[in-house]
Every structure is written in C-alpha cells, then in structure tokens.
Image (spheres, rainbow, N blue to C red):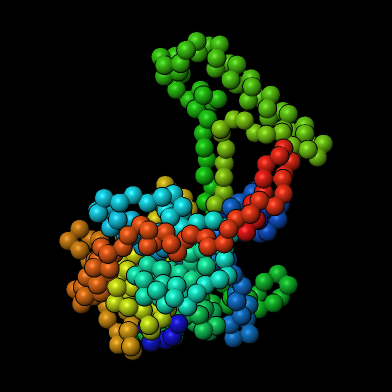
Amino acid sequence: MTVNSNVQGILKLTTPLHCASPGEHGVNDRGYVVAGKTGRPCTATMHQRILAGGLRDNIPYFPANDLRGRLRRKAAALVMESLAAMGAKVPVDLYAGLCSGAANARPENDLTIEEAVRANRHVYMGLFGGGTRLLRSGFSVQDAVPIVRSTVNAGMVPEGFGDYAEKLLPASSRNDEDGQSQLDGWKLTDVRHILRVDDAMRVLRPKELEAFVESPGETITAYQQSVFQNRKERKETAEEGSATTKTDVGNMVSVQSIIPGTELYFRLDMSDTLTPAQTGLMLTSLVALLNEQALGGWVRTGFGRFKAEHFALTLDGEQTPVFQRGPKGDYELAEALAPYVEAMRSELSALTVPDLLEFFTARKEVKLTKKAKGGANVEAA
C-alpha cells in the first residue's frame, strides 16, 4: 500500500452507531459505561485507547475489519450477480469463500508463482485476496475514527481535513477521578435503554385478549403465574450463586452508541498495481455500502445511518471526487470514474465458476488420522 492510491472521506452520522464490544459491561451510578459486572448490564460499543500530545483518550470507533468484511460481501454479490446473469449457480463452498475469504478452516501454504501471478491480476481475488492458499490483498482499510483534537494530534486524522480547514475541532480536556489529564472521547457516546414489553403479562389490552386468545381467563392467569414462578426461582438461585434461565419476554436492555453528528474519518489505501477493473470493483462496492445505510448493529431501530462527505479518490497523486448524488438522493459514482466501472464489468462477465473455485480448492489430500468418540473420523490435511 502507498500514499499514492487511496480513498478518503467523512462518514457523518445522522443516527446513533453501535458496534458491539465483547466482554461484560455495565452502567454505573454516574451513568458511565464501565467494564465488568457493575450496575445495569450494558452492551458497549467498540472503543480504543490512544495517546495524543501526552494526554490519554478513549475514543469510540468503527472497526476496519468490519468495514473490510462489508466491502468484500458487496464485491462478492457483484461477482455472483454477473455469474447468475450468465445462468451459472455457485456451489456453497464458493459462496462461503467469496463472502468471507475462505471456504473452510484448512489453509494451505504451497502457493505457486503461477497462482500468485494469476490471482494478482484477477478482478476479485487480486483485490480481496484470501482463498485456500491465503492470497495477498490489494488494499487495506483503517478504523473509522471520530474527527476530534486527540485523533488529529495522534496522527490518525489529517489536520484540516474536510470542513476542519476552516472550523475548530470538537474537543476539550478534563481530569479524571485519579487526577490524570484526560481528553473527552467519552463524550461522543450515549446510552439508550430499550424496553421490551410483555403484552400478555401486563394485560395491556384486555378486550383484545378476550377477542383473540383462546380461553383467556385460564391461559393468561396460567401464563402470569409461570412468569412469577420463574422470577422467584431466578432470585433464589442468584442468591445461592447459581442461575435459572429467564423465560418471559419482558426485558430492558441498555446499548451504548456513538452519537449522531459525529464525523468519522474514513481511509482506504490501495496498491499502486491495482488494475482499472480492480479499482472499479472497489469503488462500486464502496458506493453499494454507502447506499445500504446500515453500519453496525440495531439498524432495525434506525441506527447506522450517515452522510458520506468529502470523499475523494487519489490515483498516482491526482485527486478525483468519488460520488455524486443521484436524482433520488442516493450515491452514484462520479462520471469521471466510468472507465473503471466498464473495465470491471468487462472482467466480471468473463468469470466462470470453475476458475473461481480453483482459488478455494485444496491441493493437499485430506487424510483420516484418528477416530473421535463415537467412532467419527477426524480430518487432517
């Protein structure tokens, strides 16, 4: 990857953005999301610690690996749509390989020069890499990070990028509980409490229950008694240090998310050796991702929507706008990029299932080495 070929832009959130962080978190008495079993359980969003100008900050972000996976799946869909247009169906192994980069968990290390050269010029494999012999990718994408003083000072965001050439960055400093100077990436998140109501348990609409539920007097009473019994058992087992599974649907969940209005810096670096067709596939996949408007989780409640601003493609040091808005407000590739799209379409139309499948097919014979419990054979390469 080089600085000569890249795509940069800003994802300005218009709704909250949530990308679930692993591990247990909770909301403490001060309303902060902290790690561990503290306060009300909460699904945290992804954060990372950075050091900027000698000051620590803890910033939310959208992971590069998530962006890369989404771009791969958009490109895979373009490949399979082209195959389908020619009447071809893909086997499930190829479908899995195109969408995730590998058809199974048994990679091989005997890549030949011939396959490496062939893959490097391939419209899909040369761009995304992967396959059974772990082909090299032709691009890398960075975490999408908020544009604040700390990320600029840490070198994660170019100084003066986009509108910030003429306006101040949104951040200030503070001291945390132990007196350490700390920046305020934490202000970019909020916690939302989402309530799921059990209509039957609460008997919210008695007339409706009477009209539609069979034997409502008996069944609703029995349902309520089972819920009360389950709650009692859960409380008793919790006091004993064990657990009973919750059975009723009524629930409250807490979700942390990046607040609307936050501007995330996006950068994707491409190899200078990418072909016009590979560049076209990258750009077409990117515009499909932006038009989907569904980054992260909880998109069913409107999360993950954004505006794409200041997106520019740099090739050989020359910069070109990437998008224009279509008549319906969707994103379209700029007319100047049409040659790359045409090159992509030409090479996609020449793809065949056997040629693609070869990149995901093992060369080594799988041997049966031992038997697991129950007499099942265990595979080994």
Q: How many marks?
A: 0
Please identify the residue farthest to the left as the structure is shown.
Answer: 327
**Residue at image x 58%, y 16%?**
221
**Residue 317, picture quadrant:** bottom left
Please identify the residue farthest to the right as the structure is shown.
Answer: 240
**Residue at image x 52%, y 44%?**
194
**Residue 115, picture quadrant:** bottom left
Q: In the rendering, at what x and y percent does residue 241 appear?
A: 81, 40
Q: In the rendering, at what x and y percent does residue 36 appear?
A: 70, 55
Q: Is residue 341 left or right of residue 189?
A: left
Observer-nearest of 118 and 96:
118
Q: Is residue 343 left or right of residue 358?
A: left
Q: In the rendering, at what x and y percent does residue 78 appear?
A: 32, 59
Observer-nearest of 103 and 32:
103
**Residue at image x 59%, y 52%?**
43
In the depicted structure, whether residue 221 falls above or below residue 291 = above
**Residue 347, picture quadrant:** bottom left
The answer, for residue 275, to whether it is visible in the render is yes
Q: In the rendering, at what x and y percent does residue 244 appear?
A: 71, 33
Please identify the residue farthest to the bottom as the structure is shown.
Answer: 317
The answer, for residue 101, to whether it is visible in the render is no
Quadrant placement of the C terminus: bottom right
Quadrant placement of the N terminus: bottom left
**Residue at image x 56%, y 33%?**
250
Observer-nearest of 319 and 262:
319
